[in-house]
Amino acid sequence: MRTVHVLTTGGTIEKIYSESRGSVENVENKIERYVRRLRLPDTHLEIAHLMNKDSLEMTDADRQYVLATVQAKLAEQCPIVITHGTDTMVETGLYLRSALPQLEVPIVLTGAMTPLGFEESDGLQNLTEALFAARLLDPGVWIVIHNQVFPIDRARKDRELAKFVWVG
């Protein structure tokens, strides 16, 4: 049985619609609800909820907390998937790569353009692909989203196209 650590930070993937405010917001963690729908033979997921923030609201202290949690999980030599808002996903990934130059496992960041549970959400697809990729990729920091795999330093979010694109 292979363990994969899943660290959640919020972002669009976990947003819900608030009727009282008429907007989508990060209020609760909901990754576990969706993971239960997946068939993951021979995979054990360890899920840790770190925060529930829009990535535009993440601070340096939040990124340090993500790093400290990743460092603690690395002792187990298991791949790590981080759910994250897409707006600053690359920033967090580059921070992790800079702080962890000798990785022995893959760290995969993923998120969504449309929240889990919304019609046409890309969240479950991206989460499923990230879990699969985490078992196959070489050590390093990656973004897995929309059926693509990007080394962290080769990805950029294109807001007009609502997708990640290659750079460099």
Image (cartoon, grey):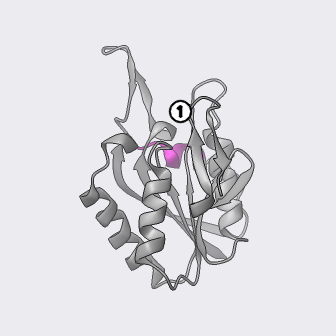
Q: Disc 1 on helix, strand or loop?
A: loop
Residue, disc 1: 115
Residue 143, percent across and down? 60, 57
| Residue found at x 73% / y 64% | 41
Camera-side residue of 84 and 8: 84
| Residue found at x 73% / y 71% | 136
Camera-side residue of 137 and 52: 137
Residue 162, percent across and down? 61, 33
**Residue farthest front in this picture:** 168
Is the N terminus in the top left, top right, bottom left or bottom right quadrant? bottom right
**Residue stretch rendered in magenta on the structure:** 29-34
Tell me where residue 112 sits by quadrant: top right
| Residue found at x 31% / y 14% | 20
140 relative to 84, above or below = below
Dominant secondary structure (helix, strand or loop) of the stretch shown in magenta: helix
Residue 31 part of the magenta-drawn span: yes
Tell me where residue 150 sits by quadrant: bottom right
Q: Amino acid at mark 1?
A: Pro
9 relative to 96, above or below = above
